[in-house]
Amino acid sequence: MLDVRTHPRWTDRMLPVIVAVAQVAANYGAQDNQPGRLAADPVGNALLLAGGLALAWRRSRPVLTLAVTMATMVVFIVRGHAYGPIFFSPGIALYNALALGHRRAAWAFAVSGYAFFLVYTTWLAPVPSPGLWHSLTIAAVMGVLMAVGEFARTRKERKAERERITEEESRRQASEERLTMAQELHDVLAHNISLIHVQASTALHLIDDNPEQARTALTTIKQASKDVLTEMRSLIGVLRDGAPRSPTGGLDQLAQLTEPAGRNGLDVTRRVAGRVRPVPSGVDLAGYRIVQEALTNAARHAPGSTVEVLLEYGSRELLIRVTDSGGGTPAENLGGGNLGGGNGIPGMRERAAALGGTLTAERHGPGFRVEARLPIAEEES
């Protein structure tokens, strides 16, 4: 059934009173044209009023309203009163029940009502039935009324279905956005906490013999903790309030990303090939996160290694390649932690696949290489 929760206008709220008064008033004209029918009396007027006022429950109790209006019509006709205005309320109730999706009840009452008219006008009415054309006219009027009701029901159902699909799509997009932010939060935490861990170990090792270098390590820890708190506030604020946010990273920020990596004991060099040009925001953020995760893994598993970060802008794809020398760590161990079965490499693969690209992570000599290929707009000639 359709769930209708609208705030009706005053004319809609006044409809039962309008119909009730109209049925009583119009009935006097109808009985003047039907001298063989019983004139309105207190009981007849009460039936006319009851049928109209029952429409007040047409939205909350549509089937009950239809039953009451049909019953008042049948009693009114059987008592011998004039045909005409008494049909207003059951017609409106029939249309309303159909429009709200109560098809079975509406059609059952429609067929029963038509059968009643056929039986009454053929055998019970004091005035004989006008004939076949009269019966066909009643059937045609009821058919048009039912068709209009079915059309209204179909429109309401289609509108409700569109609204449901739109709402589900909005929920799905919100869920995907939160999953993306959760992935970004993981990347931010993994990168900065790994940096803090390595620098804290360095500071503890050097604090007695080389306090100046230990001071540098502690400064790096302070900046890294500040950065991670800033990004966490931004992401958690979005999750709490659903407010719009700006991208948390991009390829134009790789310099800021590689500087703390260099202080982390990595010798990082950056190289750019091809014609640098703007890329889609999704590729921009994914590229930044891939480089960030690759540097985090290098700092964790190959401290002291030489790392090359390559960005190559091709005609239709962006190549991102991060290669570390291994720093003396055996190649067999470079796939541990996030590289093997954690969230790092799988997360990078998911980012690349979501954009229609690919990512490989494998041993490269004594070190390790992460290579991503992300589609970008074709270069203009």
Image (cartoon, grey):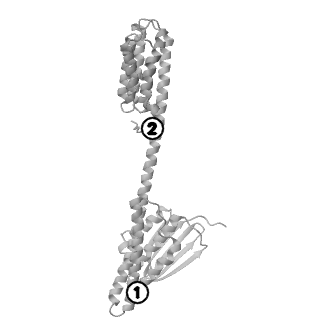
Quarter of the rendering occupied by the N terminus: top left
Residue 173 position, x and y percent, is 44, 55
Residue type highlighted by circle 2: Glu
- In the image, residue 281 above or below residue 256: above
Disc 1, SS: helix
Whether residue 73 is situated above or below residue 188 in the rendered picture: above
Q: Is residue 120 above or below residue 56?
A: above
Asked if residue 141 is positioned above or below residue 305 in the image, the reply reads above
271 with respect to 202 (left or right):
right
Q: What is the residue that sits farthest to the bottom in this orientation?
A: 209
Tell me residue 86's x, y (percent).
Answer: 43, 18
| Residue at x-position 45% and y-position 32% | 12
Mark 1 or mark 2, which has the lower sequence index?
2
Q: Nearer the viewer, residue 92 or 56?
A: 56
Residue carrying label 2: 157
Q: Secondary structure at mark 2?
A: helix
Q: Which mark is residue 216?
A: 1
